[in-house]
Image: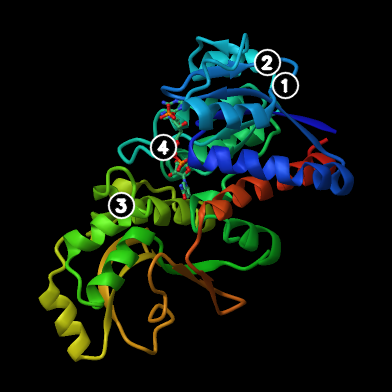
Amino acid sequence: MILRLAFIGFGNVGQEFARLLLMKRKWLVSSKGVDIEVRAISTRSRGTLLSNRGLDLERVLEELKANGDLRQYGSESVDLTPLEMLDKCGADIMVELSPLNVDSGQPAVEHVSFALQSKMHVITANKGPIAFAYDRLEALAKSRNVKMRFEGTVMDGTPVFNLVEKTLQGCEILRMEGILNSTSNFVLTEMFRGRDLTDAVKEARSKGIAEADASLDLEGWDAAVKITALANVLMEAGTTPNKVDRSGIMGVKPADIDHAKEKGKRLKLVARADRTDTGVRTSVCVEEVGCESQFWSVEGTSSALILSTDLMGDITLIESNPAITQTAYAVLSDLLSIVEWMRTDGS
Ligand SMILES: NC(=O)c1ccc[n+]([C@@H]2O[C@H](COP(=O)([O-])OP(=O)(O)OC[C@H]3O[C@@H](n4cnc5c(N)ncnc54)[C@H](OP(=O)(O)O)[C@@H]3O)[C@@H](O)[C@H]2O)c1
């Protein structure tokens, strides 16, 4: 089977996923009977490529490394908007890896919607579509008999959505709580070690952990979008990020850290989703946790999620200090889920 891919967004995650595709190409062919052809790549400022014979991924990566731009690639360089590109590329799967917009999820929601409407499967690591428009997009995917997968939106490649869908069938998720934002957790960990907030944020930026606009992390937006995505998919919450009762770590003072320390506690930014009589309540706020908490030893850029279920009790997932490869792996695992679905239910 040949699967034709189109990318919208080709930054850190897109390029790492391309490297994974090159690395796993032989395995994909020999073990899964799947070969990949990349038909199109769209970026905001580095050009757009379109080829109905398939692009040479190695050359694309070299071009980006050498020139930081795709316009010199050759006659495949075109002047098209992402939707025009999708319309012309004839891809089977659209991979959406543009940046998160916390106000509306756009334009990623539109990209996903257009692809599904055009009967393309969708893989996205962008949380926006899942946090702002999950129900509508999922219904659209079903109506067009295609799949929308998004494992990389929360905890990178750690199986969260796949775990529940594939191995917890019949379990109801009653509650979720998690440490979901790496930057905040890194900054709180460093403050506990005696550094001030500004200094710790600077280091998070220099390590490439923080979003370009670090306020998205520090004001709790990133965690709010993630808990919304989780609640929408796993608890049928039908909610949006602006309904999250949200506060970030910007107001945390060294005195707060010292006060927690005196009581033998640590501060963590905890995201929650709870069922109530009126629906699912979501929140993100700084909490003191003691050594009895599963979150106590989740330090630095690590993240964690506790799923409370009716039949399996509590299940805790911990991701230790992830790198970009984990997110790229999420995209690969989504691709393999689509292949499996095409061979079983999707025909
Ligand atoms: N990085 C991670 O560890 C990680 C982990 C989990 C999830 N994610 C999510 O994965 C997505 C991609 O992350 P990333 O780190 O790869 O981001 P990135 O490095 O900033 O790359 C974003 C890409 O999207 C392109 N782009 C921006 N606006 C666009 C638009 N309107 N239309 C088409 N393309 C557009 C950019 O073009 P230019 O190159 O021209 O700017 C760039 O190629 C984000 O939604 C992020 O939240 C990232």
Q: Which residue is mark 3?
A: 205
Q: Residue at x 30, y 62 (%)?
A: 184
Q: Which residue is tagged 1?
A: 54
Is 302 placed above or below 218 here?
A: below
Asked if the residue under mark 3 is in contact with the one under mark 2, i.e. CB atoms within 8 Å, the reply is no
Q: In terms of image quadrants, where is residue 157?
A: bottom right
Q: Does residue 148 appear in this view?
A: no
Most foreground residue, 170 or 265 = 265
Amino acid at circle 1: Gly
Location of the C terminus by quadrant is: top right
Determine if the C-beta at disc 3 is less than 8 A from ligand 1: no
- Which of pointers 2 and 3 lies earlier in the amino acid sequence? 2
Q: CA distance from mark 2 to mark 4?
A: 24 Å
Q: Is residue 42 left or right of residue 116?
A: left
> x, y percentage for residue 115?
59, 26
> Which numbered circle lies on residue 51?
2
Q: Nearer the viewer, mark 3 or mark 4?
A: 3
The residue carrying mark 4 is 99
Quadrant in the picture for the N terminus: top right
Q: Earlier in the sequence, mark 3 or mark 4?
A: 4
Structural crowding at the residue carrying mark 2, measured as other residues with C-alpha within 10 Å and reported as few (<14), some (14–19) or many (≥20):
some
Residue kind at label 3, given as amino acid type: Arg
